[in-house]
Amino acid sequence: MPSVTEPSDLPRWQRRPGERRREILNAAVAVFGEMGFASATLAEVALRSGVSAGTVAHYFGSKAELFEAALSDHFLEPMLESERLLAEHRGSFRELLQTLLRHQWARLTSPGTPDLVMVGLAKTQDVPDAGRTVCRAIGERSRQLLRAVLDGGVKSGEFRPMNTELTARVLSAGLAGLMMACHRNAAFDRAAPTGDAILEQHLELIDHAVRTS
Amino acid sequence: MPSVTEPSDLPRWQRRPGERRREILNAAVAVFGEMGFASATLAEVALRSGVSAGTVAHYFGSKAELFEAALSDHFLEPMLESERLLAEHRGSFRELLQTLLRHQWARLTSPGTPDLVMVGLAKTQDVPDAGRTVCRAIGERSRQLLRAVLDGGVKSGEFRPMNTELTARVLSAGLAGLMMACHRNAAFDRAAPTGDAILEQHLELIDHAVRTS
DNA sequence: CGTATTGTTGAACGGCCGGTCAATTACTAT
DNA sequence: ATAGTAATTGACCGGCCGTTCAACAATACG
């Protein structure tokens, strides 16, 4: 049994220019999330995506560019789904608000996301565009959706009059903070309640806070 | 005018074992906050605290130990003040809740703190004890204080019945999330409202959410 | 004033990692 | 087949930074 090296007739590597980019990007998301920007090495990204160090550089140029590409890929694209959700909804604004918040929670807590968010926020000092990406993706657009719902609810009388711009900012930031707290507590606080339980409590508080009393 | 070097009779350096530690710690808080853990260099810390590279290593051993010491110094000590605030308060629980949240907001937004929080959170992967420090300081103890206030308010009838443990977690995490969002928006979103305006909106929402309807 | 003590220095070491580039090898068109 | 092309490799370079350590100089003490 020739077990040392496969005497395969397969080539030692293949040319797959159409798929390399995505494979490298997926590995980069994982590595940056696990190790942070500075600790992450291009060699590790190369290893996980099954290519050599030079290939990573060939596709993305520099480490910083790879980082930004990874953030955009992970955050910007899934946001379109939320916007579709809002456009299609028929029903009360109270329901819509809860649905939207649940949906964003699912996005924020999906595997790899919490770490990437924190790394992206912390790295804003060095790589300004990276911070901008995260801010826009999990901040600005999310906030615009929430504000649209709040405006509708106020107009329909389901919600009490309020400054919807400020309120949308508070809700958006609160959800992100909750996500980070849950993620960290899961590692250190063994008595911590589940993320879902906390989310339910948060939604209930929000419902009381915005509806007409 | 002998301007090149001061012909001073002062020694070229002094022995001040009692003050070196604090000076290095202050510099470390600033440097880690501005540059993040990995990008921060011991040389920069040494420069800002007016000592040489070797002295930093002599006092703190390794970079990781210096980081943990800086976090503990910056977060753990000021927490005692909040606890005193709670013990001394006389008045309604609604007022106390607002006061406590304002006080914690002031702490969280004090210069250098937001960056340090984010760096500490992001670095949890590599330096577990660092993450633990941040979690305990801005999470656990803060939450216990909030919960005590909520329990009191529920018992007195000012607040509606609720799961105070979960609610305290939501409020604590929400405040931290708000702080980070404000800090980042200040850099990118020129139309962003002031942190104080957002805090006021947050407090008003909380008041509606917890009081008896 | 001389000696011991120890806080402090700064040069040097060694490892690590991002970026480059010429060589290599899988494809492709003719 | 065969030559052309471009995707991929992997060794290498250069710089950076954490850590060490022997020498040094400012105090403390007798």
Image (tube, coloured by chain):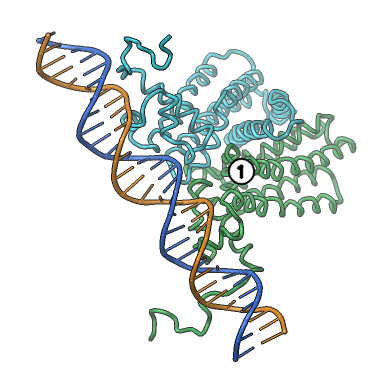
Chain colours: A cyan, B green, C blue, D orange
Disc 1 residue type (three-letter): Met
Q: Is residue B189 visible?
A: no
Which residue is drawn at the image coordinates 32% and 9% (left, top)?
A: A9
Assign the N terminus of chain B to one quadrant of the image: bottom left
Q: Can residue B182 be seen in this view?
A: yes
Position of residue A195 measured from the top left corner of the image (x, y, whole percent)? 68, 26
Q: What element carries label 1?
A: helix
* Image mark count: 1
Query: Can you say whether A8 is above or below C15 in the image?
Result: above
Which residue is drawn at the image coordinates 56% and 63% (left, top)?
A: B55
- Res. B207 image quadrant: top right
Which residue is drawn at the image coordinates 51% and 37% (left, top)?
A: A36
- Res. B88 image quadrant: bottom right
Residue B75 lies left or right of residue D15; in this view the side is right
Residue A60 lies left or right of residue B99; in this view the side is left
Position of residue B128 measured from the top left corner of the image (x, y, whole percent)? 63, 40
Nearer the observer, C25 or B5: C25
Query: Can you say whether B55 is above or below C18 in the image?
Result: below
Nearer the observer, B68 or A90: B68
Query: Can you say whether B121 is above or below A29 in the image?
Result: below
In the image, farthest residue toward the right: B156
Position of residue B159 measured from the top left corner of the image (x, y, whole percent)? 83, 35
Query: Can you say whether A137 is above or below B200 in the image?
Result: above
- Would you name the residue on which mark 1 appears? B179
**Within 10 angstroms of label 1, few (less than 14), some, or many (20 or more) residues?**
many
Position of residue B174 measured from the top left corner of the image (x, y, whole percent)? 66, 37
Which residue is drawn at the image coordinates 47% and 26% (left, top)?
A: A74
- Res. A152 image quadrant: top right
Nearer the observer, B156 or B145: B145
